[in-house]
Image (spheres, helix red, strand yellow):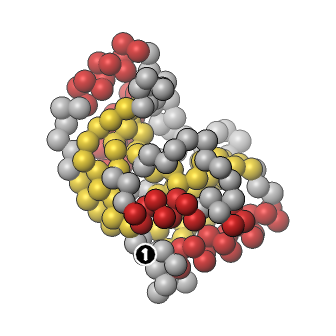
């Protein structure tokens, strides 16, 4: 089965992102707005038990994380993805690194650029038009995130939460 690990931002940010994703992201109906910490990976039932144990330990050793969003950006010319840029804080980078070591050891396909996707798979012209208009948005938002989620992919391609992990040593 395919799994992934993500943070979900607050409802306020999800609502803002979804107002655009409806039009500009073909994955809109498959997964809520999120910040990917570990891209899709395969695991069987035995593996996932060990992985969830490791994720619990990582969560206990990680304090809640401040998400700071300051602008709309793009991965152009690599690809036509438009996103809310999340500041790469030390805590966020550290959590990302922990999720790629030990029993979760893997080499990420791309450098870690914390973001929440607004639009993807756009034509060059559409990308240019949408990015131009979205860059005019004054996006200034900060929030604390106190959990991350292990997701799994259903047969229809949608993603759902397998388990949620609360951050901090007081969380069990």
- Count how many numbered circles sit on residues in the image: 1
Circle 1 sits on which residue? 63
Counting from the top left corner in percent of width and height, residue 81 is at 43, 30
Q: Is residue 129 above or below residue 31?
A: above
Q: Nearer the viewer, residue 37 or 161?
A: 37
Q: Nearer the viewer, residue 143 or 159?
A: 143
Query: Which residue lies at the image location 82% right of the left edge and 65% below the top edge?
Result: 46
Question: Which residue is farthest bottom?
Answer: 170
Query: Which residue lies at the image location 50% right of the left edge and 38% below the top edge?
Result: 29
Visible residue check, residue 160: no
Q: Nearer the viewer, residue 135 or 13?
A: 135
Counting from the top left corner in percent of width and height, residue 30 is at 55, 40
Query: Which residue lies at the image location 41% right of the left edge and 26% below the top edge?
Result: 76
Relative side of 104 to 144, left or right:
right
Relative side of 43 to 123, left or right:
right
Visible residue check, residue 71: yes
* Quarter holding residue 151: bottom right
Counting from the top left corner in percent of width and height, residue 172 is at 55, 83
Query: Which residue lies at the image location 29% right of the left edge and 44% below the top edge?
Result: 16
Relative side of 113 to 128, left or right:
right
Q: Is residue 166 above or below residue 14?
A: below
Disc 1 crowd, CA 10 A, few/some/many (<14, 14-19, 20+):
some
């Amino acid at each position: 089965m395919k799994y992934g690990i993500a943070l979900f931002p607050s409802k306020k940010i999800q609502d803002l992102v979804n107002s655009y994703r409806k039009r500009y992201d073909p994955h809109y109906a498959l997964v809520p707005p999120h910040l990917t910490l570990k891209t899709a990976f395969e695991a069987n039932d035995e593996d996932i038990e060990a992985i969830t144990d490791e994720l619990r330990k990582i969560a206990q050793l990680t304090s809640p994380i401040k998400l700071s969003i300051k602008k709309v950006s793009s991965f152009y010319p690599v690809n036509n993805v438009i996103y809310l840029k999340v500041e790469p804080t030390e805590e966020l980078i550290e959590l990302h690194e922990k999720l790629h070591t030990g029993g979760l050891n893997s080499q990420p396909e791309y450098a870690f650029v914390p973001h929440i996707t607004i639009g993807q798979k756009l034509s060059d012209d559409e990308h240019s038009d949408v990015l131009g208009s979205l860059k005019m948005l004054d996006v200034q938002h900060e929030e604390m995130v106190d959990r991350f989620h292990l997701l799994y992919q259903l047969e229809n391609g949608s993603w759902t939460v397998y388990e949620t992990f609360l951050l901090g040593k007081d969380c069990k």
